[in-house]
């Protein structure tokens, strides 16, 4: 039976490792588990304290707002609806600090369930939500009616839309009655915000654990250092055999000849010889696999349907596939050695170079970068670039490689989507979304520079009659004719939008020539002229127009639109083809 050589080094090193490392690992595990147990207990304490603090903040802000309402009713010179509107406007601007993601805000409802003011759900303002329930069937209005019957107000839990996450989440709100107005005022917080506070605590806990792990790691490192010193002492005793092995090792590896393990004296060297032999065999296999891999890599790169190129650290192209040659339009000879900057648009050079430099320095992949390149025939093409770092066998950075994707069609599709998002599909005019964004910008400008802004609300009279008698196709033809007449009537500085089936709005904000009434009269006159709808004469179309003016009629966007809309309906009730200015009492 073959004698097995025992390794003294193995015995000593294993015993030392067990003697030193096991107690340290055990101690570290106990410390970490203990910290985790106390953190779990702290989690409930944090949650309870957070809820208590939030309740104090929101209750205080509601009571403060109600005190202001009552003070205003005593001091205010203007009675009636204007006073209530002013109070609602003031309440809508209130924001206060709390522990949540967003500043706190208030809401106001009537006891009958009319939403008078809501920051998180402005679309419900003015609507009856007395029957509105959440996904669990909970009616928040009924909960608040019970809460406000309690002395000093009360709390209610329900689900409501959270604007910071854009999701419906569980919310707790405090509400208190204002009986002299028939209102109740409330404010609340979302329970989801508690997780943010706990998350911060988790970070602190994590850092603490990392420090403890680092301490244990240092102790383990010291242990391994001690083992190394012991190993050095033992190595002195076997130096002669070691030198013999090194000489043999150098000769064997330089010629890829396997080491003869039988000629060695100690088990350590026998094992090393076996490892070297395995390494030599593996290297031979790896060399062949590398050659095969390079061939497959070249084949794949040449056959993918995307462009591919490699550039050196100087920016010159060193390798590319046929698809890259097709995208750029240059011959292989022209592309080889060309500096990549030659093909870039001047506006994109700085952006592309910064993107490439960031990836080269950090070696962290980035999202695809879209830019323009100039082809050889001087045409431009949108491409998507996804560069990564190229390294040599020693890990040194030598350049960048990138997939070059032709995204011309994608860019055209994206631009079309953007157009459809802001334009009416039938008339090509700006749509409701575009109108409200334009109105917001125009109001900001008017407030800043002290100019006037006119909003003309146009409703087409008897449009339904055309659809009913001539069909919807003729109705579409009529809308296109109305669009043309409006565009011919209005000035270049005026903004026109179709916001409904037969409703149009016009923004007049020229500070040097502000005459919205004159423009409205021209609109009414031009739209009342007979229409020839593919041979069908229509002479009964007219329009009703409502006008509101900033800052005379309203200073906020919703009020300005509402008053113009109300004025339009008054005009329609008077008679078709009538222009009506907004009434400040509307």
Image (tube, grey):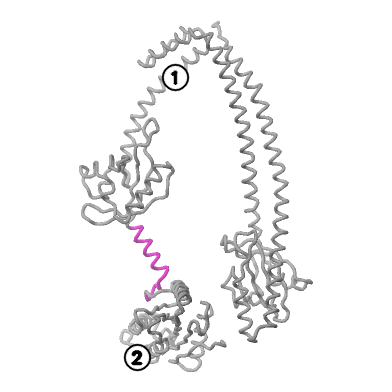
Query: Residue at left 61%, top 84%?
Result: 82
Q: Is residue 271 magenta?
A: no
Numbered disc in front, either 1 or 2: 1
Q: Residue 207: x and y, percent?
A: 61, 42
**Secondary structure type for disc 2:** loop
**In which quadrant will I find the C terminus?**
bottom right
Boundaries of the magenta span: 409-427
Q: Quadrant of residue 79?
A: bottom right
Q: Looking at the image, which is closer to me, 507 or 467?
A: 507
Kindly identify which residue carries mark 1.
278
**Secondary structure type for disc 1:** helix
Numbered tag placed on residue 530 in the rendering: 2
Q: Looking at the image, which is closer to me, 211 or 462?
A: 211
Q: Quadrant of residue 362?
A: top left
The residues tagged by marks 1 and 2 sit, at their Cα atoms, a distance apart of 96 Å
- Magenta segment, principal secondary structure? helix
């Amino acid at each position: 039976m073959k004698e097995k050589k025992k390794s003294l080094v193995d015995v000593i090193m294993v015993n030392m490792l067990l003697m030193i490392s096991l107690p340290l690992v055990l101690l570290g595990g106990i410390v970490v588990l203990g910290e985790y147990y106390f953190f779990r207990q702290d989690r409930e304490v944090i949650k309870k304290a957070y809820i208590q603090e939030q309740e104090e903040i929101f209750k205080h802000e509601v009571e403060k707002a109600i005190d202001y309402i009552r003070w205003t009713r005593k001091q205010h010179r203007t009675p009636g609806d204007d006073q209530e509107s002013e109070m609602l406007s003031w309440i809508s601007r209130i924001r206060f600090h709390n522990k949540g993601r967003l500043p706190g805000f208030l809401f106001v409802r009537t006891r009958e369930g009319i939403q008078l003011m809501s920051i998180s759900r402005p679309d419900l303002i003015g609507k009856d939500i007395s029957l509105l329930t959440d996904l669990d069937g909970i009616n928040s209005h009924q909960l608040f009616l019970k809460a406000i019957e309690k002395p000093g107000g009360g709390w209610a839990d329900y689900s409501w839309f959270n604007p910071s996450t854009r999701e419906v989440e569980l919310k707790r709100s405090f509400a208190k009655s204002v009986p002299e107005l028939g209102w109740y005022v409330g404010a609340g917080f979302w329970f989801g915000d508690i997780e943010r506070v706990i998350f911060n605590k988790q970070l602190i806990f994590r850092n603490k654990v990392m420090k403890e792990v680092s301490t244990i790691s240092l102790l383990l490192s010291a242990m391994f250092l001690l083992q190394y010193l012991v190993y050095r002492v033992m190595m002195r005793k076997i130096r002669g055999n070691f030198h013999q092995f090194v000489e043999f090792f150098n000769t064997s590896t330089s010629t890829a000849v396997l080491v003869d393990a039988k000629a060695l004296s100690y088990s350590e060297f026998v094992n090393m010889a076996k490892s070297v032999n395995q390494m030599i065999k593996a290297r031979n296999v790896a060399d062949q696999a590398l050659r095969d891999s390079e061939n497959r890599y070249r084949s794949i790169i040449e056959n993918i349907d995307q462009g591919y190129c490699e550039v050196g650290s100087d920016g010159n192209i060193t390798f590319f596939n046929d698809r890259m040659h097709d995208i750029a339009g240059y011959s292989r000879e022209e592309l080889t050695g060309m500096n990549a900057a030659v093909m870039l648009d001047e506006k994109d050079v700085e952006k592309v170079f910064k993107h490439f430099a960031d990836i080269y320095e950090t070696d962290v992949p980035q999202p695809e970068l879209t830019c323009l390149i100039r082809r050889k025939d001087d045409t431009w093409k949108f491409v998507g670039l996804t560069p990564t770092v190229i390294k040599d066998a020693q890990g040194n950075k030598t350049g960048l490689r990138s997939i070059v994707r032709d995204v011309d069609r994608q860019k055209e599709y994206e631009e079309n989507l953007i157009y459809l998002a802001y334009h009416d599909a039938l008339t090509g005019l700006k749509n409701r979304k575009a109108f409200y964004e334009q109105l917001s910008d125009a109001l900001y400008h008017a407030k800043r520079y002290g100019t006037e802004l006119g909003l003309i609300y146009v409703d087409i009279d008897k449009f339904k009659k055309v659809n009913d008698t001539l069909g919807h196709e003729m109705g579409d033809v009529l809308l296109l004719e109305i669009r043309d007449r409006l565009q011919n009537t209005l000035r270049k500085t005026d903004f026109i939008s179709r916001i409904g089936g037969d409703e149009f709005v016009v923004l007049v904000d020229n500070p040097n020539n502000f005459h919205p009434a004159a423009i409205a009269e021209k609109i009414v006159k031009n739209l009342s002229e007979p229409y020839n709808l593919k041979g069908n004469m229509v002479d009964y179309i007219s329009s009703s127009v409502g006008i509101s003016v900033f800052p005379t009629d309203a200073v906020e966007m919703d009020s300005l639109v509402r008053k113009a809309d109300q004025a339009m309906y008054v005009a329609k009730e008077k008679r078709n083809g009538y222009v009506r200015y907004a009434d400040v009492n509307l």
